[in-house]
Amino acid sequence: MDAKERIEILVKLLNQYAYEYYVLDNPSISDYEYDKLYNELVNLEKEHPDFVLKDSPTQRVGDKVIDKFDKITHKVKMMSIDDIFSFEEVDKFVNDMQKINPSITFNCELKIDGLSVSCIYENGYLVTASTRGNGTIGEIITDNVKTIKSIPLKLNQPISIEARGEIFLPKKSLEKINQERSLQGLDLFQNCRNAASGTIKSLDSKVVASRGLDNFMYTLLNDNEVHGQKEALDTLVSLGFKVNNEGRLCKNSQEIKDYIDYWKIHKDDLPYPIDGVVIKVNDLGLYDSIGYTVKSPKWEVAFKYPAEVGTSILRDITFQVGRTGVITPVANFDTVYISGTDVSRATLHNEDFIKLRDIRIGDTIKVRKSGEIIPEVFEVDFSKRKADSKPFKMIENCPICGSKLVRNEGEADYYCINSSCKARILNSLIHFASKNAMNIEALGDKLIERFYELGLLKSIDDIYRLKEHREQLIKLDKLGEKSIDNILTSIDASKSNNLDHLIFGLGIRNVGSKVSRTLCEHYPSIDLLKEAKYEDLIKIDDIGDVIALSVVSYFKDEHNLTLISALKELGVNVNYQKINILDGAFAHKIVVLTGNLKDFTREEASNIIVSLGGKTSSSVSKKTDLVLAGDKAGSKLTKAEELGIKIINEDEFKKMIGENNE
């Protein structure tokens, strides 16, 4: 037997043994026997590197270190799930669905407490894995995902599909990691989710490989032969994926409630963390007719278990200053352990919130996590209040700059109106560079604060002047030339962002990312938006009185107008590009890409197709309208020819783009 043949046999055997161990939890050989075969494979591959297979278990070791994660645009948006918290809401969801189809059934699944992942396979091989990101654009984490042994590098069938699921850290893995971190004097991870998220975002895949991450898949895309969620899970298993086996097909509210009640009692016995139950309509064919909101599908909800409650002593109330100058009271209390984390601080929102609940320093308070994420003080035990306790009194001056605070009539919040306040400037800079604003990913919060202290960042426009200080920056401790150039490149790239990102980044009060897009749809340049009148703004859907007043007020401020002029001069885009997909060259067309393109990456071509009204798919079917074929196109091209689907080459693709842009 030659080396190539032996390598192929070893890869097949070792992958099967790994599947039995990591997916089925039923190993058929000992660790010693596995290691012996694995070492044989390693030695053979060293001697014959040309024979290394893409699905070899040696490709999981994690030997890559990267500078940053590249981005990917999801072909199908990775939406969030609406949360519900009561059985009354379960009844309402079921009743709403039964109005659509009285015989409808529901697949109930455990809601794994980890982070979402998308895995794209072409011809059976894993080619791209990515995070959810903001739902539209995620980060490519393929090298890290390859270290997770429950995610197959090669499917049991040579098909092209996308599988989505949850990466999580088993409870035992967290214990092991924290034991090691304790010995090293490092901070401990507070829960499995935080540890999983921090691990998968590591730039060193060796770190990821050492942590013991696991995965359950629960969604299958691009398979037109699958008609139900339960069937989708069975198909995922047949392809070699690991799915959670604790799901149940339910016919009515009572069966769903029984499932929820059972796992409320037994969830702590599971070897992995869960924070609720996902209830999905089983019939995939009903999804489009049931529909979607902007953020979530209407055909599924997540029942979240009640938050754990902790009791503590309120030691102090301190105050934070936000980017708009808003002053937020913060409760500081003795540390309590709630829903997997130590908690010692919680927002108290504003003066009215505190006075309505009569919260006082020294009180015994009850704390919970809203949605198991944000700590909040929700109750005071008045029976334990001390006789000498004093009612809360709001501060009169900014805790940072000392300026007199202002509370506008009809508003609950106090504001520091000093535009030179350090806290306001720092938070406005951090917001401007944040992911949903200008997305200057290399410029993190700590760097912004460091550059501010050095006097290099005094206002938002100074971000785009940092390149003038390059020589000074590269001499800073723990940075260096490569890091600084990455930062400057990231800053420069943000100049071309669409106008809605800039509007959101400017931090106009009451104007979030969605409202920013709405404003830009009606005022596609910042010059037009500057001149917008209150009476015209309030006619726009989603723009009410408060938002309209905020926008008009912002553009009346000379300081803000000076900032906008500076950003223009520095080359920041101040126009909004609106694409009418109904007129696009690929409007309503499903396009499959295959082979190697000369002048486009696969992602670039896909983004162009989507921007011009089309959809891309990774597999050819009767629903496919076009196939864009490059060099070395394979089975997809053959199938398209068999089905009589129109095939275009790269030159024809360029003409279609050109015609659309004329």
Image (cartoon, helix red, strand yellow):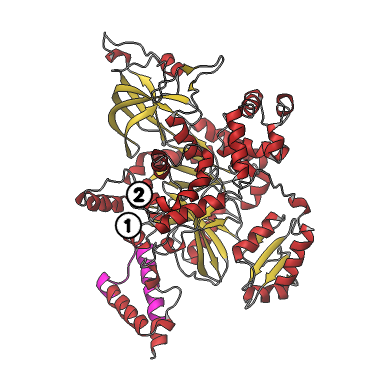
Q: Secondary structure at mark 1?
A: helix
The residue where tag 2 is placed is 195
Percent across and percent down for residue 102 are 64, 41
**Left-right relation of 570 to 254:** right
- Asked whether 28 falls inside the magenta stretch, the response is yes
Q: How far apart are the two marked residues, 2 and 1, measured between alpha carbons?
A: 9 Å
- Decide: is 308 above or below 80: above
The residue where tag 1 is placed is 211
Q: Which mark is residue 400?
A: none
Amino acid type, label 2: Ala
The residue most toward the left is: 183
Residue range corresponding to the magenta coloring: 8-33
Amino acid type, label 1: Arg
Q: Secondary structure at mark 2?
A: helix
Percent across and percent down for residue 298 are 61, 41
Q: Residue 123 versus residue 90: which sits nearer the camera?
A: 123
Q: Main secondary structure of the magenta part?
A: helix
Q: Earlier in the sequence, mark 2 or mark 1?
A: 2
- Decide: is 237 above or below 251: below
Residue 244 can be seen in this image: no
